Image: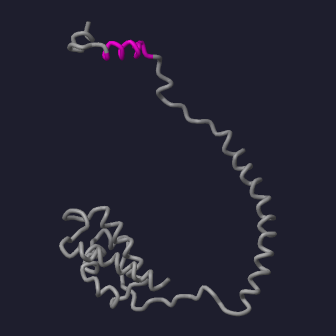
Amino acid sequence: AEESAIAALKRALGALNTYLASHTYLVGHSVTLADIVMTCNLYLGFIRLMTKSFTSEFPHVERYFWTLVHQPNFHKILGEVKQTESVPPIQSVKKPGQPKEAAKPKAKEEPKKEVKKEAPKPKVVEDADEEEAPKPKPKNPLDLLPPSKMILDEWKRLYSNTKTNFREVAIK
């Protein structure tokens, strides 16, 4: 699974690297929302997962990332950005031996606990509904105005059925 994730990341960074070989930014000639989103997506990878040796395969992506991170507005939000020196170890999902057997009794006990927890929750939801119900809706200021003397249906009929200059007919 890890190898396939690394291969997918390399394919994506390779495609981005190819595009950035002839462009400074993703869209146009200045920083856009696309650049902000892409930099924020790359940020976590650069500070936690992608070492210098890994990203050296994608020089245009590196240039792009560091160019944007050093922009004043990025620097205000992200602060000083440092690329990770090493990849954190991956924790094993499966542990051999007795933990599998111990997990089975726990699984049997958990449904009983969940049933007990589910009963009080509907009461909390009902209490929340009772609290929200009495709030009146604010009145629309337009409802306070007097009714209009203009008959809108009549005006629409006149406008739709006039084949000549509407201005001459409407002013009469």
Q: Is residue 46 above or below residue 116?
A: below
**Image location (x, y in percent) of residue 168:** 21, 10
* Residue extent of the magenta highlight: 148-160
**Does residue 106 appear to the left or right of 15 in the view shown?**
right
Determine if the magenta segment contains residue 37: no
**What residue lies at 60% left-to-right and 85% top-to-bottom?**
93
Estimate the x, y position of residue 115 in percent, counting from the top left. 79, 64
Instruction: Describe residue 64's horizontal placement relative to residue 128 as left or right.
Output: left
- Which SS does the magenta portion mostly show? helix
Residue 157: within the magenta?
Answer: yes
How many numbered marks, from 0 up?
Answer: 0
Q: Residue at x 48, y 29 (%)?
A: 141
User: In the picture shown, does residue 48 fall above or below 36?
Assistant: below
Q: With 90 as the anchor, is 123 left or right in this view?
A: right
Say if 78 sits above or below 152 in the image: below
**Quarter of the rendering occupied by the C terminus:** top left
Residue 152 appears at what percent x and percent y? 40, 16
Q: Nearer the viewer, residue 9 or 81?
A: 9
Q: Residue at x 42, y 77 (%)?
A: 44
Task: Please identify the quarter of the rendering in which residue 64 is found.
Answer: bottom left
Determine the residue positioned at 36% across, 84% down. 82
**Does 155 sit above or below residue 99?**
above
